[in-house]
Amino acid sequence: MTDIQIITPEELKKKLEAGEKVELVDVREDEEVAEGKIPQARHIRMGTIPENLDQFDKDTEYIMICRSGRRSENVCSYLQDQGYKVRNMVGGMLEWQGEVK
């Protein structure tokens, strides 16, 4: 298995502040997202990723986000196996210091 690329919350925050276009996907459950998510992130629950593969493009890199980084790592592993480019935000929303809405 190929190692999963990672990004730290600090690195992601810098990219967003610099205006870089990044594709963020929050894989947490609805009630977790209701408490706040990164404004630019799309919400696709972990359990629904397989049925939502049509929302992903194999030429685009996606940064996967969850509460602590474990679930998003599992999603990254799955998507990577399907041929998608992904990065896991390590530490998840527990470590995120940027804007949430």
Image (cartoon, grey):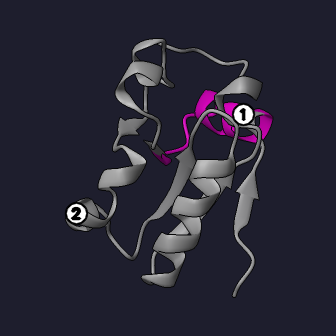
Q: Secondary structure at mark 2?
A: helix
Q: Residues within 10 Å of mark 2 (few under 14, many from 20)?
A: few
Residue range (magenta): 10-24
In terms of depth relative to the viewer, which is nearer, 76 or 41? 76
In terms of depth relative to the viewer, which is nearer, 73 or 88? 73
Residue 64 falls left or right of residue 57: right
Residue 18, image x, y percentages: 63, 33
Residue 14, image x, y percentages: 72, 33
- State the residue at coordinates (68%, 31%): 13
Give yes or no for residue 16 being in the magenta stretch: yes
Q: Which residue is mark 1?
A: 14
Callout 2 amino acid: Glu
Which numbered disc, 1 or 2, marks the residue that appears first in the sequence?
Answer: 1
- State the residue at coordinates (45%, 83%): 83
Q: Secondary structure at mark 1?
A: helix
Taking 99 as reference, is 91 above or below it? below
Callout 1 amino acid: Lys
In terms of depth relative to the viewer, which is nearer, 18 or 34? 34
- State the residue at coordinates (68%, 45%): 69
Q: Which residue is mark 2?
A: 51
Taking 100 as reference, is 92 above or below it? below
Residue 94 falls left or right of residue 37: right
